[in-house]
Amino acid sequence: MDLRIQKAASQEFERFWDYSAETVWNDIPEAERRDYDHAEFEQAFRKVAEPIVRSPQNVLYIAQIGGEFAGYIVIGPSHSPLGGKVYGFIWDLYVAKAFRRNGVGTALVETAVRFCREQGYQKVRLETAAHNSTAQALYEKLGFHSERLYLGKSVEG
């Protein structure tokens, strides 16, 4: 397998949006998705996500296999509201369906960890949907563990 990971060039950023919107859309609990118009959701998501992706502090890495797009990861700094200490944060990870379960996700996360080490961060964190057991299994295999738990409850009826 000819896996190559490199920093994205600015012209590659447009391709990122469709995949990123898909991952975030899939993270929304299914019962909540019916409350959203998909196109409006994507527009609103892009307004929030674009400053993160385009920040000069963050890096978008693209994975390719045999010249084909295989996935990406967005990594950069964040800080805890509890203490203000800066750490690395994986903002988004996507592996194209054709390349899943082939080590692409592992290689991208390892690239992000290396980036964090080079930046002098002592920790890297990420967030994933509670129902995304596939992603959770990958992260746990790579040494990530739960640090905080976010809970939600509908207040309707």
Image (cartoon, rainbow, N blue to C red):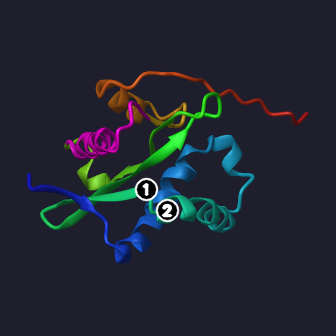
Dot 2: element: loop
- Label 1 amino acid? Asn
- How packed mark 2 is, by other alpha carbons closer than 10 Å (few <14, some 14-19, many 20 or more), is few
Q: Is 53 located above or below residue 105 in the figure?
A: below
Rendering coords of residue 33 (x, y %): 67, 50
Rendered image quadrant of residue 71: bottom left
Rendered image quadrant of residue 42: bottom right
Span shown in magenta: 103-124
Q: Which residue is mark 1?
A: 58
Q: Is residue 149 left or right of residue 12?
A: right
Q: Is 81 located above or below residue 141 in the figure?
A: below
Rendering coords of residue 29 (x, y %): 63, 40
Residue 76 seen by the camera = yes
Rendering coords of residue 7 (x, y %): 28, 62
C-beta proximity under 8 Å, tags 1 and 2: yes
Dot 1: element: loop
- Label 2 amino acid? Ser
Main SS type for the magenta part?
A: helix
Q: Residue 112 lies in magenta, yes or no? A: yes
Rendering coords of residue 157 (x, y %): 91, 33
The residue located at (31%, 41%) in the rendering is 109
Q: Is 153 located above or below residue 97 in the figure?
A: above
Residue 55's disc is 2
- Residue with the most extreme left position: 1
